[in-house]
Image (tube, rainbow, N blue to C red):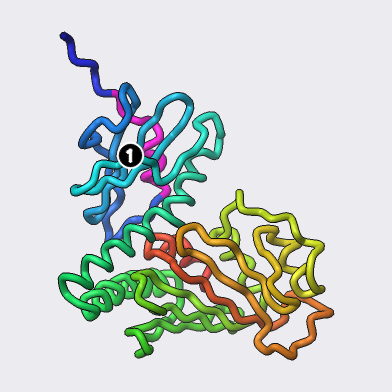
Amino acid sequence: MPIAPVVHAQSAAPLAALLPDRRGRAWQVGPAPYCIRPNAATSSITNLGRSLIVAEEGGRIEVFHNRPDKFATAPAAVADASDRDAVPQLAARILHGVLPALERESARDTARERGWRGVVADKADDMTEVGYALIAHGAHPMAVADLNGPALIWVSDSGAQWRLGMWGTAGNLTLTYDGPVSGLYAVLPSLLLLDDGQGQEDAGSAFTRHLAGRFPQLRPLTPGEVEFSRLGDVGGYIALPAADEPTDYADDVRRVVAEFSGLGADLLLTLVPHLI
């Protein structure tokens, strides 16, 4: 019986190109280690020991985790191949959900093998990589000691203070912000998934409407706070700095505090140009 020729996934290379280099290494496209869907065009994309399988069949593009100890049965991300934005949408879902989940798995394995200090050392390496990217874009990050380990702080051109560190034990990173609300406008489009809009820009106070009108993915929690929903463990909030702040007016220079948690190093590297 003749063997069917291997057909590679056409979306694999453009998808890999949308994921950031890690430690000077780009994502590599290669043959898939096994057939995850019969007769589907299939390829793998790999970087720093992480491997994803891309399969195309029936008008769908599916992305699977490739774990050495587990055969993938359900895709981690799916897109309609007929959608012109299918590959960028998949890249966003990989950055927001798939890769952070792999980081959490890796942190659990590290904790079992090397203890919490091993997890902290790995996260310190990730923050160092982000720090060098910040320096390359003109920022001046400073390393500080935090409750759960090392952290980075820097001041943006708008005078806002950013902080990147470890909160909790999940194995991802948390980014915090203190400064004018307009200093978040550049980074929020990359943090908020486009298909998560709630359409509630007429809800809440003048402050929450100001944000939700610009970013419908944001939902009012209180008159002085909005949140966005989570993909995996990625989520966040933007709030006025004090509970007694007036909420009946809003403008671009209002001071806010914000927190974005569950972030993977890959997503953070794509955000760097918007954090300066």
The image quadrant that residue 191 belongs to is bottom right
Q: Reply yes or no: does residue 8 show up in magenta.
A: yes
Q: Which residues are magenta?
A: 7-18
User: Which residue type does callout 1 highlight?
Assistant: Thr
Q: Which residue is mark 1?
A: 73
Q: Reply yes or no: does residue 2 show up in magenta.
A: no
Where residue 175 appears, as percent x and y from the top left, is 48, 75
Q: Specify the farthest residue to the right.
A: 248
Q: Secondary structure at mark 1?
A: loop
Where residue 243 appears, as percent x and y from the top left, is 70, 88
Where residue 190 appears, as percent x and y from the top left, is 54, 59
The relative height of residue 48 versus residue 186 in the rendered view (above or below) is: above
Neighbourhood count class around disc 1 (C-alpha, 10 Å): few under 14, some 14–19, many 20 upward: few
Q: Is residue 187 left or right of residue 200?
A: left
Q: Specify the farthest residue to the top.
A: 1
Return the residue nearer the eye: 111 or 162.
111
Q: Quadrant of the N terminus?
A: top left
Q: Who's the residue at 68% across and 72% down the image?
A: 221
Q: Who's the residue at 31% across and 47% down the image?
A: 65
Where residue 231 appears, as percent x and y from the top left, is 50, 57
The relative height of residue 144 versus residue 67 in the rendered view (above or below) is: below
The image quadrant that residue 82 belongs to is top right
Q: Who's the residue at 68% across and 82% down the image?
A: 240
Q: Is residue 1 left or right of residue 232?
A: left
Q: Is residue 274 left or right of residue 142?
A: right
